[in-house]
Image (tube, coloured by chain):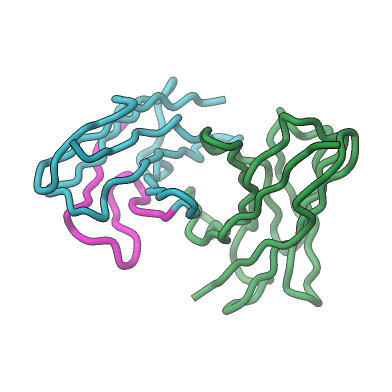
Chain colours: A cyan, B green
Amino acid sequence: EIVLTQSPGTLSLSPGERATLSCRASQSIRSSHLAWYQQKPGQAPRLLIYGASSRATGIPDRFSGSGSGTDFTLTISRLEPEDFAVYYCQQYDSSPPTFGQGTKVEIK
Amino acid sequence: QVHLQESGPGLVKPSGTLSLTCAVSGGSISSTNWWNWVRQPPGKGLEWIGEIYHSGTTSYNPSLKSRVTISVDKSYNQFSLKLSSVTAADTAVYYCAGRRDGFASFDYWGQGTLVTVSS
């Protein structure tokens, strides 16, 4: 199965700062098969980005995704208070679909 | 807007069978969606369990395949999960989720339900 490794494990930033989250795959993935989710405590994951760079419905444009092959990035241009959460990348280029272990974005 | 809601026992005994149902509203279970189960042990990451199409076609995670059955009930617009021979390692929040056919992402999620395996 494809292993997704996210870095860093924790990102400590202040509101208004830029967040850059990394997701590296153990083998090349088609960009159309990479997604990003946000999860807050006690809540289900919420789809942010699909196809590596397309924002899901209702997602603010401060969230953007990029990358190809084995390296993908989620960028939050200016952190809002509601953006502090755990973020997961996920692939379904091959079965089984897998998730990264998550990056926690916390308030500095 | 599709809405998903999990239901089922919150406590299962070791060696027993975990059974959950996901009710689909705001859309038909016979639409072009794959219906999934994903779990998350307390404080840990997400693990895909398996999925089903309304035709009955299924796909399971090889790590769980021998213990998992996912089925669909079109008459009630719902789908179900059965996980047999459970142990404490199966304690987790179980989510149902929907994936559009041809897409890799899980667009719709239920709120999740905590299932604890304990005697």
Q: Which of B36/B92 is in front? A: B92
**Residue located farthest toward the right when viewing the structure as drawn:** B16
- The spot of residue B27 in percent (x, y) is 59, 77
- The spot of residue B55 in percent (x, y) is 75, 62
Q: Which of B32/A72 is in front? A: A72
At x 44% / y 20%, what residue is drawn? A26
In which quadrant of the rendered view does residue B29 lie?
bottom right
Instruction: Give, as a single range, the part of the protein colored magenta.
Output: A46-68
Vertical comparison of A88 with A38: above or below: above
Vertical comparison of B34 with A87: above or below: below
Count of residue discs = 0
* Left or right, residue A8 beside residue B99: left
Vertical comparison of B114 with B119: above or below: below
At x 44% / y 31%, what residue is drawn? A100
* Left or right, residue A57 beside residue A76: right
Which quadrant of the figure contains the N terminus of chain A? top right
Q: Which of A79/B103 is in front? A: A79
- The spot of residue B44 in percent (x, y) is 53, 33
Q: Which of A70/A46 is in front? A: A46
State yes or no: residue B81 in magenta. no
- The spot of residue A29 in percent (x, y) is 41, 32
**Residue located farthest toward the left when viewing the structure as drawn:** A16
At x 55% / y 34%, what residue is drawn? A94
